[in-house]
Amino acid sequence: MRPDQFFYPDTFTFNSSTYYGQRDSSKGRLYIPIESDLCPFNIGDIIVQKMVDRERLFEVLDYEVQISLEAGCPGYSHLAVLIVKALDVKEKPKQITTHLTFNGAINAGGDFQAGNDNSITKNITIQQLHDAIEHCNDPEVKSLWQKLLENPTFASIASILAKSALGQ
């Protein structure tokens, strides 16, 4: 005997047997009345939903058996609640989020922001950077700065930027 079509309008096939039930796509669940507390479905099983001219495949991720009180389905004393994943749905690409953490002491106010998606932009000239490096007492920083200034790629990029700044 078929369960009431109003309560269980969907048709499913599993192991050559036809089952009637209801699909709740918002929760990713199938509700299928069964005759006993022995669930015919297991984790990893594939269930086919039959529609007019096509089929949808669902993989069982988890399940539980509940007492149904035979509401809308005389002769079916239990309800298999299946948590499923539709196999014909393409997963949305996951957004890659990069987190950078900078820990520094705050000695004075100004330019401090906390939270997500905040940014502070400061612009300095190459001359200001050069002067700051020359006044520092770190020989490694001075050595790296000198290597950068002598690098032909850096020199060509700097000259192109200078020409564009001058409007040439």
Image: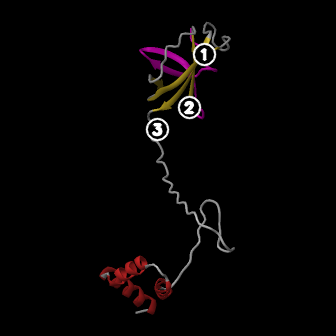
Q: Residue at x 60, y 9 (%)?
A: 76
The residue carrying mark 3 is 89
Q: Secondary structure at mark 2?
A: loop
In this view of the protein, which residue sits in the foreground, 2 or 127?
Answer: 127
Residue under circle 2?
28
* On screen, residue 123 above or below 116: below
The quadrant of the rendering that contains the C terminus is bottom left
Q: Nearer the viewer, residue 165 or 52?
A: 165
**Sequence-wise, which precedes: disc 2 or disc 3?**
2
Q: Which class describes the residues within 10 Å of circle 1: few (<14), some (14-19), or many (20+)?
A: many
* Kind of residue sitting beneath label 2: Gly
Q: Which residue is mark 1?
A: 79
**Residue for point 32% across, 84% down:** 150
Question: In the rendered view of the protein, which quadrant contains the N terminus?
Answer: top right
Q: Position of residue 20 (x, y in %)?
A: 54, 18
Residue numbers of the magenta segment: 1-27
Q: Residue at x 55, y 60 (%)?
A: 101
